[in-house]
């Protein structure tokens, strides 16, 4: 059954982004195009250009939307508790939307959006740990890179589009426990760095 074609008046930025995130999550970033979005929405692809100038504009809008409701840490917790909460929240987003995380890593403007949307709670936690500016910058790099690395180390990129677990017999609970153990090593390292 063919999709009923919608007219441009039924389109909105939000509807286009809903379709784009579903497409990227299902088929990967390389599958995202104005033509495919038009087909998914049942409109002429040119209608999408009324809202977004190109694919990159859609990707940047997706990154901003994805991270717009990023968690805020409880300022009453200890700094390690707040770092754990931040890292877990970021990891959850990365697992849910791996194609977009790859886009963030490969685009400096997307990185800037991600930092603007997410960094505040992490920076505050590391500042409360007593780290100076250099230690805070190092801490952010280590925590973010550890999270990215843990995902990439246990997954592959099939068909150049999305992260999928490839370790037979290793389930999500095992991977989560391994991530938590590594996160404790990172936090202990930051504590040692603070004392050095």
Image (cartoon, grey):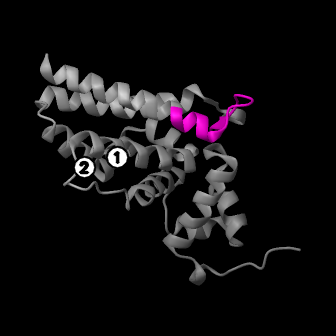
Q: Which residues are magenta?
A: 161-177
Residue 88 x/y as whole percent: 42, 45
- Residue 106 vs 33, above or below: the answer is above
Q: Is residue 145 left or right of residue 162?
A: left
- Residue 41 vs 25, above or below: the answer is below
Query: Regarding mark 1 in the picture, which secondary structure is present there?
Result: helix
Q: Is residue 165 part of the magenta span, yes or no?
A: yes
Circle 2 Cα neighbour tier, 10 Å, few/some/many (<14 / 14–19 / ≥20)? many
Q: State the residue in front, 151 or 162.
A: 151
Q: Give the residue drawn at x 60%, y 70%.
A: 47
Q: State the residue in front, 8 or 85.
A: 85
Q: Is residue 141 part of the magenta span, yes or no?
A: no
Residue 194 x/y as whole percent: 15, 24
Q: Give the residue drawn at x 85%, y 73%.
A: 2
Q: Which residue, given by chain and number where applicable, does mark 1 sit on?
A: 86
Q: Give the residue drawn at x 65%, y 32%.
A: 157
Task: Verify CB contact (< 8 Å) between mark 2 and mark 1.
Answer: yes
| Total number of numbered discs in the rendering | 2
Q: Is residue 61 left or right of residue 35?
A: left
Query: Regarding mark 2 in the picture, which secondary structure is present there?
Result: helix
Question: Is residue 97 among what the camera can see?
Answer: no
**Separation (CA) of disc 2 from disc 1:** 7 Å
Q: Which residue, given by chain and number where applicable, does mark 2 sit on?
A: 121
Q: Quadrant of the C terminus?
A: top left
């Amino acid at each position: 059954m063919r999709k009923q074609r919608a007219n441009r008046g039924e389109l909105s930025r939000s509807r286009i982004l809903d379709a784009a995130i579903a497409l990227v999550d299902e088929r990967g970033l390389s599958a995202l195009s104005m033509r495919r979005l038009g087909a998914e929405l049942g409109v002429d692809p040119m209608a999408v250009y009324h809202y977004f100038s190109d694919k990159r504009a859609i990707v940047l809008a997706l990154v901003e939307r994805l991270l717009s409701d990023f968690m805020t840490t409880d300022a009453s917790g200890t700094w390690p508790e707040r770092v754990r909460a931040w890292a877990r929240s970021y990891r959850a987003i990365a697992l849910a939307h791996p194609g977009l995380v790859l886009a963030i890593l490969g685009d400096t403007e997307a990185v800037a959006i991600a930092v603007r949307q997410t960094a505040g709670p992490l920076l505050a936690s590391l500042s409360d740990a007593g780290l100076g500016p250099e230690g805070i910058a190092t801490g952010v790099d280590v925590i973010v890179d550890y999270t990215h690395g843990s995902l990439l180390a246990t997954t592959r990129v099939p068909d150049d589009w999305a992260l999928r677990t490839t370790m037979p017999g290793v389930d999500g609970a095992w991977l989560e426990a391994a991530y938590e153990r590594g996160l404790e090593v990172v936090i202990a390292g930051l504590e040692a760095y603070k004392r050095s």
